[in-house]
Amino acid sequence: MKINQMPAITWGRLNVNEATIDNIEFSNLLHPAETVPAGVDTEDFEEGRRYSFHISQEVPLRLDIDISDKSNTKIDITVEEGISAFVIENISSAEEGTGLVETSYSVASNASLKFVQIVRTGKDAKAVNRINGNVAEDAKVSVIQIFTGSKANYTELRSDLDGNRAEFTADIGYIVDTDDLLDMNYVITHKGKSSESLLTIDGVLYEGASKTFRGTIDLKHGCAGAKGTENENVLLIGNTMVNKTVPVILCDEEDVEGNHGATIGKLDEDLVFYLESRGIERDRINSLMADARIRRVASLIGDEETVKTILDEEQE
């Protein structure tokens, strides 16, 4: 089956237009383990679980999803007008196989959502992760994602900035170890006037790793004054990894601004020489530099329990 398809295709020989996985029927419905703060209503629907915020929250809604083979988890998040919401979604697995997690959010006018997602499944597990969202007038969405320690991660995020002055930011950190894979597809669609988006991606690829990042900012007709920016910074530790970075700007409006960039490279050898001369071994230097990428993103979460868990695991 085809997943993570770009909205506008490029040369097929580059093998970046989409990802392909085995045809799987995700038939095992799996609800998350949850910690629900006051002011959040919950409701089961036919295929999943719905969470509705009607009181502003500083305490996060915590959703722990332990995927299993062919499991299917669907989560719907609704944030009412003028409300601030905080959600932490932790995706993990102790089993082999492939699980699907689908999250949707709808953020009403003058509301805000901070959505944190940590994906660190087991070495023999694969995660297919899809996020779809709508952002209304004067609403703000902040997405923070960290990917570590999985055999294969396929993740997609599509967010429509429907309202005027809608804002979307994404801060993403990843470490892809030897022989592991990370495949990402982000599509931010600007429809409202003066809407803004910013994608910042920091990642590390070790020897033999494989990563594809597709980032599309789609500036639709009528979104005058909109601004979209995406930047990826990739650190290569080794010589035989595969890195594909595909930043795309689509534009159907004149009075807009679209920016994209990527920095891909290895550690500066002068820096490495200096640190080695201070008694730090090369493997430790690599580990420190990789850890710094994750720490930057983790510092944005704003929840000590989650940050401590992430950093403790990175030090193991």
Image (cartoon, rainbow, N blue to C red):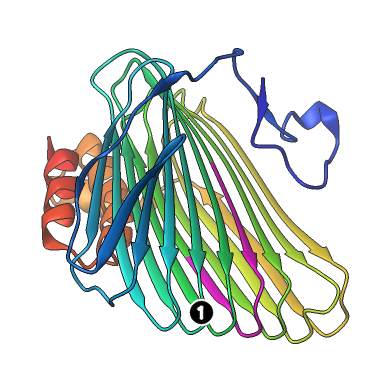
Picture coordinates of residue 265, whole percent (x, y): 51, 47
| Magenta stretch secondary structure, dominant | strand
Specify whether residue 165 is painted magenta: yes
Of 264 and 138, which appears nearest the observer?
Answer: 138
Q: Residue at x 48, y 58 (%)?
A: 105
Of 90 and 56, which appears nearest the observer?
Answer: 56
Quadrant, the N terminus: top right
Q: Is residue 288 left or right of residue 224?
A: left
Q: Which residue is mark 1?
A: 139
Q: Residue at x 77, y 31 (%)?
A: 14
Please indicate, yes or no, whether residue 76 appears anywhere in the rendered image.
yes
User: Which region is colored magenta?
Assistant: 156-169
Of 202 and 228, which appears nearest the observer?
Answer: 228
| Total numbered labels | 1
- Residue 135 to residue 176: above or below: below
Quadrant, the C terminus: top left
| Mark 1 residue type | Ala
Q: Is residue 12 left or right of residue 18?
A: right
- Residue 261 to residue 94: above or below: below
Residue 95, by quadrant, is top left
Of 226 and 230, which appears nearest the observer?
Answer: 226
Q: Residue at x 45, y 80 (%)?
A: 81
Please indicate, yes or no, whether residue 179 appears anywhere in the rendered image.
no
Q: Residue at x 59, y 82 (%)?
A: 137
Specify whether residue 139 is painted magenta: no
Picture coordinates of residue 47, whole percent (x, y): 46, 34
- Residue 271 to residue 23: above or below: below
Looking at the rendered structure, the secondary structure element under dot 1 is: loop
Picture coordinates of residue 4, whole percent (x, y): 64, 36
